[in-house]
Image (cartoon, rainbow, N blue to C red):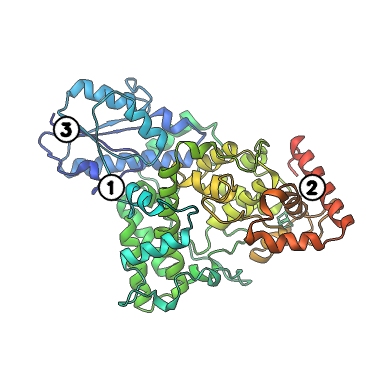
């Protein structure tokens, strides 16, 4: 064997750099389902189904192209259980002249392979627009990083939504303020495209049922795309039926509407079934053809070439120390209801419920409902990070850790984002209809039936006053707090204390 080429489960792209120069007559490609990756956090069963099925389909597609593939299933008796173990096993067997691997998404996986003692030729991951070294160069010498400036740089580099003179289309770089409309009564998201399980997926479902049924999340109802062709269909469906309204209602939430106008392509993109540049070009073209408004096109492209590339850059710049950050000193365990959805708070019940059912919630649900509650309640960062990593179909460490630790929990002290995304129940009321069916009253703050987010919001501000009140973006809320009567402040503090004590007593609220 001339070269052994390892393809990780989130690298299912025919253009993967580890496959560059592949000689089908002498090289072999290795893919392995390993217990270490499936079980290092209790991944949602549908996420394991998605990954294993997509891997199996990709292996088959490579074989159809005449490439020799070694595929190790989870239940293969010879399976060592780890990626490094499998690579070493096949390397000892074939004694290849070279081993090629594309850099891993996760720091932990890359370290394990680097510690294996094998001589590996590493390749940059071209699926991202900004390389690790490119991001380090951009960040170098900056005291504070801000997504907005990185994003403008990426717009200039790619030419997306850019005028010939280098100015942004529409005269402004960022239309975030036009992405915040609540959902009008009676408006529903488009019909969801669902993909039926084929024989390969059914075999994986049986395997996951046998090995991972104890993980939280529904085993049944899996409908994600597992091939490049299916992912393409999902993408075209979004372009036709979702994108135009995505801009206006990007931040909206509604009971019984798990997807609204969101593309739901994050999982397919993150494992290589879709190509980033192609998605952005399609959205740019849809805008230029007059099919969608600028706030839809810019809002979507910002998520991909702005936030997604930015958090990946920060991850590789800051790991492994980043995972240890805990600037607010949080230590509370994650409440059990994050795993079951059994709470009287309707917003939490809706978001966690759809997460268990579909392994999906959109960005604002993750940031401003489950994330916001964890921030206000002072949940320990590792516990919350593991939860997000486990329950979401599209969650991989490089994207989940900065989003949760940095953006949700402000645990990096403001390195990634300029302020904590803390909000009272008023935000959730404005952006959703969740409060209408809640047993708590969103207008109340200190009564027994008052919305827990309200008192916890003020309690959070009071207990972190020293750290946060000097932040210019927090000055208005601290001025509001200062103007509040002492007795009101005292009542909010006491209600907050009592809610936190109930959490500590494992009351689901
Ligand atoms: Fe959530 Fe509070 Fe609204 Fe209930 S009242 S749905 S807990 S924000």
Q: Nearer the viewer, residue 269 or 142?
A: 142
Q: Earlier in the sequence, mark 3 or mark 2?
A: 3
- Residue topped by disc 1: 13
- Give the vertical position of 355 relative to 300 (above or below): above
Q: Depth-wise, is mark 1 or mark 3 nearer the camera?
A: 3
Q: Depth-wise, is mark 3 or mark 2 nearer the camera?
A: 2
Q: Which x, y percent locates residue 158? A: 31, 64
- Residue topped by disc 2: 496
- Give the vertical position of 436 relative to 111 (above or below): below
- Give the vertical position of 463 relative to 258 (above or below): above
Decide if residue 15 is on the left or right side of residue 322. left
Q: Nearer the viewer, residue 330 or 256?
A: 330
Determine the image quadrant of residue 503.
Answer: top right
SS category of the residue bearing label 3: strand
Decide if residue 145 is on the left or right side of residue 103. right
- The quarter of the picture where the N terminus appears is top left
**Residue at position x 54%, y 68% from top?**
249
Distance between the alpha carbons at the discs numbered 1 and 3: 18 Å
Distance between the alpha carbons at the discs numbered 2 and 1: 49 Å
């Amino acid at each position: 064997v001339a070269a052994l080429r390892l393809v990780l489960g989130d690298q299912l792209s025919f253009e993967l750099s580890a496959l560059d120069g592949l000689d089908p007559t002498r090289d072999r490609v290795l893919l392995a389902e390993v217990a270490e990756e499936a079980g290092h956090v209790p991944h949602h069963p549908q996420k394991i189904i998605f990954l294993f099925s997509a891997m199996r389909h990709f292996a088959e597609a490579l074989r159809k192209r005449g490439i020799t593939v070694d595929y190790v299933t989870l239940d293969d008796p010879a399976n060592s259980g780890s990626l490094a173990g499998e690579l070493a096993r096949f390397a000892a067997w074939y004694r290849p002249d070279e081993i090629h691997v594309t850099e891993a998404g996760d720091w932990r996986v890359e370290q394990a392979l680097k510690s294996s003692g094998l001589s590996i030729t590493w390749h940059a991951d071209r699926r991202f627009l900004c390389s690790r070294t490119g991001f380090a160069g951009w960040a170098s010498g900056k005291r504070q990083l801000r997504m907005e400036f990185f994003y403008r740089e990426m717009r200039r580099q790619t030419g997306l939504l850019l005028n010939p003179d280098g100015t942004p289309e529409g005269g402004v770089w960022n239309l975030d303020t036009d992405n915040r409309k609540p959902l009008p009564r009676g408006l529903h998201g488009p019909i969801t495209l669902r993909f039926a399980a084929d024989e390969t997926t059914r075999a994986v479902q049986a395997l996951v049922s046998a090995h991972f049924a104890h993980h939280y999340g529904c085993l049944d109802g899996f409908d994600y795309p597992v091939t490049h062709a299916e992912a393409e269909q999902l993408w075209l469906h979004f372009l036709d039926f979702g994108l135009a309204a995505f801009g206006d209602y990007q931040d909206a939430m509604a009971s019984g509407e798990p997807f609204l106008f969101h593309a739901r392509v994050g999982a397919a993109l993150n494992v290589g079934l879709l190509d980033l540049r192609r998605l952005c070009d399609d959205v740019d073209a849809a805008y230029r053809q007059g099919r969608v408004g600028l706030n839809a096109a810019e809002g979507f492209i910002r998520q991909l070439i702005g936030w997604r590339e930015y958090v990946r850059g920060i991850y590789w710049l800051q790991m492994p120390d980043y995972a240890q950050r805990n600037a607010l000193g949080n230590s509370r365990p994650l409440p059990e209801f994050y795993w079951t959805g059994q709470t009287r708070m309707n917003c939490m019940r809706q978001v966690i419920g759809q997460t268990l059912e579909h392994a999906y919630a959109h960005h604002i649900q993750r940031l401003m409902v489950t994330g916001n509650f964890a921030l206000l309640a002072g949940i320990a960062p590792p516990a919350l990070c593991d939860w997000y990593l486990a329950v979401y179909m599209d969650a991989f460490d490089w994207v989940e850790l900065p989003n949760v630790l940095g953006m949700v929990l402000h645990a990096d002290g403001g390195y990634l984002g300029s302020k904590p995304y803390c909000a009272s129940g008023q935000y959730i009321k404005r952006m959703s209809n969740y409060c209408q069916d809640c047993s708590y009253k969103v207008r109340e703050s200190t009564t027994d039936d008052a919305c827990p987010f309200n008192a916890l919001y003020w309690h959070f501000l009071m207990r972190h006053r020293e750290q946060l009140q000097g932040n210019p973006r927090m000055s208005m809320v601290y001025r509001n707090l200062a103007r509040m009567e002492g007795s009101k402040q005292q009542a909010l503090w006491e209600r907050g204390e009592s809610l936190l004590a109930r959490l500590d007593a494992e009351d689901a609220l």
